[in-house]
Image (cartoon, rainbow, N blue to C red):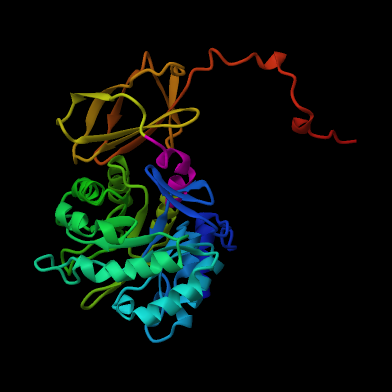
Amino acid sequence: MKTVFTLIAIMVLYGLSTQAATLPPVKRVETRAEGLYVNGKPFFPVGIGWAGHWHQSLPEASAMGFNLVATHGLRTNVASFRMDIDDAWANGMYAACSVTNGVWQDLERLEQIVLDCRDHPGLLVWELEDEPNHANNPYRFPPEKFEPVYELIKRLDPVHPVYINLAVGRLKDHQDYAHVADIHSDNYYPIPVASVTGVARYADSTINGSGKLGWQWIQMCPLQEKPHNRAPTIIEARCMTYLAVSRGISGINYFAFHYMGKDWTWWVTDNPATCAQWADLTAELKRLTPYLVSPKAPGEIKTEMTEGPEGGLYTSLRQTETGYFLIAVNGATTPMKARFTIPVPERKFAPQAAVRSENRLINVTDGVFEDSFEPLAVHLYELPFSTESAPDRNTIDWPRWQRRPRGN
């Protein structure tokens, strides 16, 4: 049985405080082309499944850095839905309040749930039935079933988006369900039987099919039966994460904190060192939110493979106020080298780019640079604008509010 000592040991290993992180109370949620905005500021969801309610793992999930958790109330207890959001919020996470497992089918009860929860500061989104399209011939719950559900939620609560997660990555499915949700997602769990690159196809189907904001569920736990059973390595999980982001996905959920097979049970906390790796990944994603929730840069990036197979490198170029940000992912299980040619903006580039999370710099000449990739490697390049035209700092009359009082 898990104990408080396990939680404390994990938090000490992360080097984190046992106090939950602070998120601002949700007052306004917007879905823009580049991502989600909470109270006018970009927000990149780093979510976790099977951590709340009967999984009893919210403190540990919060300590690992997740900022969103799927919450489930008891079907027969309207008040329990707000209580579950309370638990997520108390542990420093927003809630995706799920009305799955048929809860949405009772519109009178659903109305009570929405009215009871809509003003909660920790509510981020409403989640409809999980995987309603599976099996997809015919659909388990066809999209027209959700039309009155979507209308009711949006009428009673125009502040929070409605979110739906589909399965099997079919473009047509996302087209069919496009009108009953504001955010679409799909789940891709390939380990150890399929390639990680399939997540790119699922992401394309989600975004192109729905025409809505796209999230992605990424595998975290083992999902096969023995002996072919293992969880993704953090290298595989990080690769899948950025493959999805490179295709335009603007929020990631991980499945799952806890899972049970026929004769086995898995908790991510069984291996504290693995938890520390996940804490690094969640911290990275949250730290890079201004880059991940940003518009595409103008022009087309040119990628030339100097070593390794063609077609294995996935890229996405974003623009921020201070420069460009390039996401480059090697989806192949072999190493490669590549030369990138970035369209040079009017403000030009600084002579070096920072490779984020790797503590290294790389030379950039007229928008061109080269780099090597290990199998499944992710490189994140921050290309600042040139400072050649910046004002001379010695001539600036600094405002008084930037001066700190001197000590005695």
- Quadrant housing residue 325: top left
Question: Can the viewer see residue 217?
Answer: no
- Quadrant housing residue 102: bottom left
Which sits in the foreground, 395 or 192? 395
Residue 148 to residue 380: above or below: below
Residue that sits furthest to the left in the current view: 137
Counting from the top left corner in percent of width and height, residue 347 is at 46, 17
Q: How many marks?
A: 0
Residue that sits furthest to the right in the current view: 408
Residue displayed at 48% across by 74% down: 115
321 relative position to 244: left or right: right
Question: Can the viewer see residue 74?
Answer: yes
Counting from the top left corner in percent of width and height, residue 149 is at 32, 70
- Quadrant housing residue 192: bottom left
Give the extent of the magenta segment.
282-295
Counting from the top left corner in percent of width and height, residue 394 is at 70, 14
Q: Main secondary structure of the magenta part?
A: helix
Counting from the top left corner in percent of width and height, residue 300 is at 28, 25
20 relative position to 306: left or right: right
Which sits in the foreground, 174 or 54? 174
Q: Reply yes or no: does residue 393 show up in magenta.
A: no
Residue 141 to residue 164: above or below: below
Residue 391 to residue 155: above or below: above
323 relative position to 407: left or right: left
Residue displayed at 28% across by 25% down: 301
Residue displayed at 9% across by 66% down: 137
Which sits in the foreground, 102 or 179? 179
Quarter of the figure with the C terminus: top right
Quarter of the figure with the N terminus: bottom left
